[in-house]
Image (tube, rainbow, N blue to C red):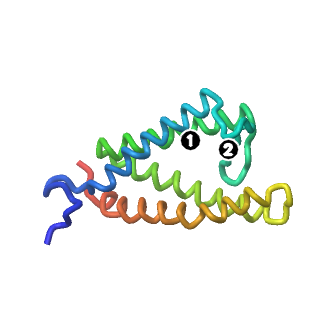
């Protein structure tokens, strides 16, 4: 029986994965707008974390813009059915998972970061599920012979 989420015989890219990629593109636009217009919640200084390192202010705006570009790139790669799209998505998600672990472990005993560690710990299962979803959907696509 055919998978209802698969579009056609010649098209082996799951529809839900392409929808996920479209949502990633939209999310990248939100991140890019936040970084350009310095939008942060409650008037607080904008913050961003990459590989467990927290950035503030203009540095955070730059790292957030870079993440937005990477997310848009893999979203576009998946939507246009390019093999590098899922590869880039997997690499990015590995960075996000590793970043959460590094951030939590390095700030576990820091009282000033207690709230941020708690937020990262709450986010971690969702981040891991997204990473596993990307891996599960990308796996068969990466095994296809390239033409």
Residue 30 place in picture, x, y as percent: 51, 37
Above or below, comparing residue 7 to residue 68 in the picture: below
Q: Residue furthest front?
A: 42
Q: CA distance from mark 1 to mark 2?
A: 10 Å
Element under label 2? strand
For residue 48, the mark is: 2
Comparing labels 1 and 2, the label whose residue is closer to the camera: 2
The residue nearer to you, when weighing 75 against 35, is 35
Answer with mark 1 or mark 2, whichever residue precedes in sequence.
Answer: 2
Q: Residue furthest top?
A: 37
How packed mark 2 is, by other alpha carbons closer than 10 Å (few <14, some 14-19, many 20 or more), is some
Residues tagged 1 and 2 counted as in contact (Cβ below 8 A): yes
Residue 81 place in picture, x, y as percent: 29, 46
Q: Position of 20 compared to 8: left or right?
A: right
How packed mark 1 is, by other alpha carbons closer than 10 Å (few <14, some 14-19, many 20 or more), is some
Q: Position of 33 compared to 60: left or right?
A: left
Q: Which residue is mark 1?
A: 67
The quadrant of the rendering that contains the N terminus is bottom left
Residue 69 place in picture, x, y as percent: 51, 36
Q: Residue furthest bottom?
A: 1
Element under label 1? helix
Residue 111 place in picture, x, y as percent: 86, 60
Above or below, comparing residue 133 to residue 66 in the picture: below
Q: Residue at x 69, y 38 (%)?
A: 60
Q: Residue at x 58, y 54 (%)?
A: 95
Q: Residue at x 34, y 49 (%)?
A: 83
Q: Position of 65 compared to 41: left or right?
A: left
Above or below, comparing residue 70 to residue 127 in the picture: above
Q: Residue at x 70, y 54 (%)?
A: 52
For residue 23, the mark is: none
């Amino acid at each position: 029986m055919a998978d209802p989420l698969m579009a056609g015989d010649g098209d082996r890219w799951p529809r839900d994965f392409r929808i996920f990629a479209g949502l990633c593109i939209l999310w990248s636009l939100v991140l890019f707008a936040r970084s350009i217009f310095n939008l942060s919640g409650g008037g607080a200084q904008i913050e961003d974390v990459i590989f467990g390192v927290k950035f503030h202010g203009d540095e955070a705006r730059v790292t957030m813009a870079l993440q937005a570009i990477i997310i848009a790139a893999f979203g576009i790669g998946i939507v246009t059915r390019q093999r590098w799209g899922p590869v880039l998505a997997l690499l990015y998600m590995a960075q996000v998972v590793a970043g959460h672990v590094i951030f939590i472990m390095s700030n576990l005993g820091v009282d000033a970061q207690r709230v941020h560690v708690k937020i990262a710990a709450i986010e971690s299962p969702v981040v891991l599920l997204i990473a596993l979803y990307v891996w599960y959907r990308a796996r068969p696509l990466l095994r296809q012979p390239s033409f």
